Amino acid sequence: MFNSRTYGTKGAKRRPLQKRHIEETNDNESLSSTSDNSSTPAKKKPRVQPLGPISDEDDHHLNGEFPAAIHVYLQFNGLQGPSGQNVGSNATNLSPGSVDMAEDSSHASQAKARASYAGHDSQAFGGGRKYVEPPSSQLTSKPPSKAKTGKLRRDDLIQTNARQPTTPTKLSKRMLSRSRMEPSVVSSGGPSATGSSLSIASHPSLGDASHKSLSPSKSLPAGLFSADEPSSPMPASRPPNQPLASKHARTYGGASRSFLVSLSLPSDPGASQAQEDDTSTRESYSSLRARWGVDGSEDDFHPSPDISPSNSRNGTPSKNKGKGKAMSSHNRAADLPQGMMNDLRSITELRSKGESRRFLDEVGYLFEGMDAKGAIGLRRASAIELINKLCDTQFARKAKAADFLCKIWDVMRDAGAGRGDKVLDIALVSFVAVVARDPKALEELAVQISTSPTEFTLGKTLFHILDSSRSLDALTCGSLDLSPAEAKRYGLSKNEIMQLKSLYKVISADSAVFPISLLVGYFFLVLMLSLMSETYKLSTALLVSHSLCTLNPRHLPTCELPRLLATVKEALTYFLDRLAAYSSGLSLFPSSDTPETILSKLLHAENCLRLLESFVLDHWSIQTEGAAVEDLSPTSQDWLLQRLVSISIVMEIIQRQSGAYSQELVRHATSCGEITFRVFMSLTHDEPDWCSALLDQEPGPLHIVRTVIRAHKNMLPQVKREPVDEQAMVKQEDDSVFDFEEDDRIPNIAGALALDRLCLALALLTNLVQGCEDAKDTFRDLRLDPRCRIKRGCIRSCSCPNAASSLDAICGLYTDYLKPDISGEFGSDFVSGHLSILFGMLMRGSKVNQAHILAALPGPTNRSKLNTMVERSREFTAFYKTLMFKLQQSGGPPEGPDNGGRSSAVGRSQDIRKTQEAGEKIDATAREIITLLEDMQIRCLD
């Protein structure tokens, strides 16, 4: 106990640290002095408590003077001068745990000290409330009780005449500092103080002589006693402490702003009002979890299985039964309160759960910002921030895993995207373009939107925005430094310009949304080239056309063909004008167009041509079939072939002048030229009207023959025999051995690309000759030089001096494939057989062409020449049958954007059926030509 502890220095007499002994109480007990009946108090935790006023009986035992510690204490707090006199008229309250050892030499100085101690302003330390003077009956001088007298006499057994130190010791300093830091000091407005929270009372001045003598039991403040039992004796044993009522202080200047929640206990009558205040201003966590669906979220991918009860002991057997029981109770899962769950079994699940919660919080915050009732500026800013987050691969992956893509689409649509708002429309297009980085994710999004009860599907919405962007491309305006006058002329405000700039920066810097696929030969090798977005000049039309190309064509309605044709016309007009400028002597592209702008226009045109090809191949969903077919006819769309021929010629010029342009531009030019020829093939297949219209285009036939010759020249240097070594085998994971092609001829990539272009050009030439009778005379009269480099004057007609008939140039290709060093190489048999079929078509019904071709072909006699053509034609038909058989066995052409991206079972079955029909027609035509050549061989006289 602190009141029996001594202090001092080594070798000096010890002196008691006089302290009043106050026992610890609880909320339901009164604190009183020691009763006469209790000779041995119960053991309690020693606790330093505040002291009451000093009585005369206490003065009798103080040895007549203040200890050095009290001198220092009073001097430190400004209550006593250096010589011992009181400085102020009032003394301060001693904080809990301080030492009351006031000893003075005279009775007068003790009375003055008590008066100064009791009357000091309580705000000096800010630790307590004003003391209410007890009734006069309690201040009546009474003889001390036996218990109190005995206590003081026990204290007197310790000698108190030790030498007084001149300076405070370390122990006294530590005790004084502890008294200032006692955490149990709290202000209480009630009339009583609990056992754990006692206030310091400032006592009134005791100037009257009748009040000089107070009994020890009455000398404590009235606030320390219960109102019902002012002087009840202290029992020897106390009942266990009851839970204390929450007596917290509000923190922010109002009951409704406290972060604490009051607990309603019967012992605290004031808690009900505080609880009403808490419940009226905040929801409980259980109601919040139920309202937001936290426990029932779909992101909990690993629910914890129910643990079946077991009667077996969890702990290991032990000799000590009590220890085993303790271990068993420790290993048993703790019971959780009602409404709580603990299904996390590992730190991995805990981390995943936290990441999912954080992701849902971010998405929910952005969704709230895009509420339809919010301000338009807030909706736009939230949409831009959402696009910025979706550019992050991890965020996009989480959104896809949580099935949030369709939700984002719905929220953006409800916010006003796709309804004419320039910023929100661009945000919606950017969202689709970012999702299109994964074609499967875009397919899932399109399916979910099509099944939702809305009239605007993904394809319709994109075509609507694409059509509106032809008048004003807002995203392009965001990349320009427009003046306020120019922005006003475009109908854009200052805030819209700033938001468009921010959106353009996000898309161009943080997302790579333009993968490219190239079709390589018959192996259908898809090369995914991840291009940096900074290479392109982004525009709304480019983003929309790219997304539409990535989307499966079965989600594109045929009723949107007029909008597509209008976009194709605008995209190809640029290259038509550039070809006219180049023919007149100007550069192919103006100096005002940057390489990024040219590349963006070229890529947009290529996307439009891919969409057009997918429509011609009947890959779109049929809704208004009659109107769509009527719109796409050579009579109503006479501009289409002119622009297709123009862009194809421009692509040829870029490839021939590849050193003047970037490698990226040349690559796109090659791809765009190939897709243009495929559109030509699709339009002219069994379509005599389109064949006649293409032949009427002045540079069209010349460009087709020139493409055949150029592809042949590019293929010849690449054709090399590369026999496969026996050790060059690929061992699979299942220990099976995979061999290469049967004919052990493996082409490189350049040779395969050249062969692919050559086959495309020959197929188009065959379609024209088969579909239009005038083609035989047109190609015979067409003149060109095989070594022409497409000068400005040779674009529409070759003006080279060595120009000859195009039939002679085609016969020269056939002669090259008959040479011994090339014959038998990869692709040579197929090309020579195809040329033999073409020669038979040109000679059928035309004596002039028959004589011209037989005269140009190599061989001693016409019979031998015809015999060679028959053999090559039969090899071609055999190869084509094998190819069709392999395609049927594999389930049709491989999936990808080049064949329309058909992934459904219905689309695949349609492709197989069309492939079979085309194969049957080609086989029938080849058999007719072979029969014709055999008849000509029989009738040949020489």
Image (cartoon, grey):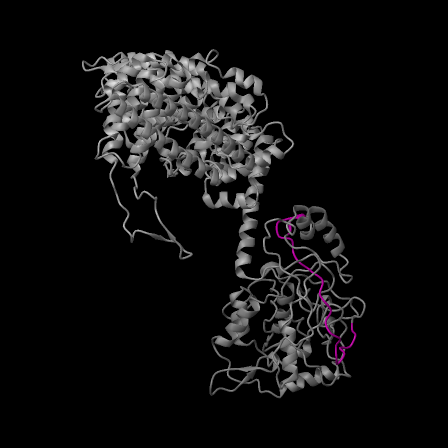
Relative vertical location of residue 923 with respect to residue 407 in this rendering, above or below: above
- Comparing 635 with 297, the one in front is 635
Residue 574 appears at what percent x and percent y?
37, 18
Give the dominant element type of the magenta stretch: helix, strand or loop. Answer: loop
Q: Is residue 257 magenta?
A: yes
Residue 869 appears at what percent x and percent y?
31, 26
Relative vertical location of residue 797 with respect to residue 275 in this rendering, above or below: above
Point out the stretch of residues depicted in magenta: 231-258
Relative vertical location of residue 245 with respect to residue 850 in this rendering, above or below: below
- Comparing 36 with 862, the one in front is 862
Tell me the quarter of the image containing the N terminus: bottom right
Q: Residue furthest right?
A: 228
Residue 554 appears at what percent x and percent y?
54, 30
Residue 94 is left or right of residue 634, and the answer is: right
Residue 269 is left or right of residue 628, and the answer is: right
The answer to whether residue 648 is visible is: no
Residue at 51%, 18% in the rendered image: 562
Residue 331 is left or right of residue 746, and the answer is: right
Dividing the picture into quadrants, the one containing residue 99 is bottom right
Dividing the picture into quadrants, the one containing residue 370 is top right
Residue 649 appears at what percent x and percent y?
32, 20
Residue at 68%, 81% in the rendered image: 43
Relative vertical location of residue 635 with respect to residue 364 in this rendering, above or below: above
- Comparing 580 with 685, the one in front is 685
Q: Is residue 48 magenta?
A: no
Tell me the quarter of the image containing the C terminus: top left
The answer to whether residue 609 is visible is: yes
